[in-house]
Image: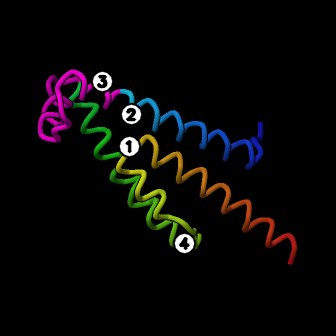
Amino acid sequence: MKVSPYSLSWLYFALAISGAVLTTLSNIDYMMTYGNFNINDFISLANINPASESLSRDLFVGASAITIWIVNEAKRLQMKYMWIVYSSFLIAFAFAAPLFLFLRERRLIEISENEFNI
């Protein structure tokens, strides 16, 4: 089953919105529970037991690899407005990665249409 590039791009966009909303809600819950946002306490809590430590390390390594790919892929495809994606990392990786995939898919559609029209 082949998914249309337009449908795939909107799926990525929906995941980006979900990633922004869900992580923001969790961060608000953290601040309501522990007071102001303290990065040292946040990291400490994210590593409080072996299960959470495993998830934190998994996210760190996976997100690092994907971030390197995002930077290189954006250059390769000559994508515009990448500052939006780079800024979205301040909200959450779960927002930034699917947002990049949405913009990448739209860029691939644009390239495909331009090749077809030549």
Residue 113 vertical position relative to residue 88 in the rendered view, above or below: below
Identified at 21% across, 21% down, the residue is 33
Secondary element at image label 2: helix
Residue, disc 2: 24
Indicate yes or no whether the magenta region holds residue 44. Answer: yes
Q: Residues within 10 Å of mark 3 (few under 14, many from 20)?
A: few
Residue 86 vertical position relative to residue 24 in the rendered view, above or below: below
Residue 67 vertical position relative to residue 59 in the rendered view, above or below: below
Residue, disc 3: 29
Q: Residues within 10 Å of mark 2 (few under 14, many from 20)?
A: some
Indicate yes or no whether the magenta region holds residue 82. Answer: no
Secondary element at image label 1: loop
User: In the rendered view of the protein, which quadrant contains the C terminus?
Assistant: bottom right
Camera-side residue: 51 or 15? 15
Labels 1 and 2 touching (C-beta < 8 A)? yes
Q: Magenta region: which residues?
A: 26-51
Q: Residues within 10 Å of mark 1 (few under 14, many from 20)?
A: some
Q: CA distance from mark 3 to mark 2?
A: 9 Å
Could you tell whether 82 is left or right of 14 in the image?
Answer: left
**Disc nearer the start of the sequence (4/3):** 3
Residue, disc 1: 92
Residue, disc 4: 76
Could you tell whether 29 is left or right of 113 in the image?
Answer: left
**Disc nearer the start of the sequence (3/2):** 2
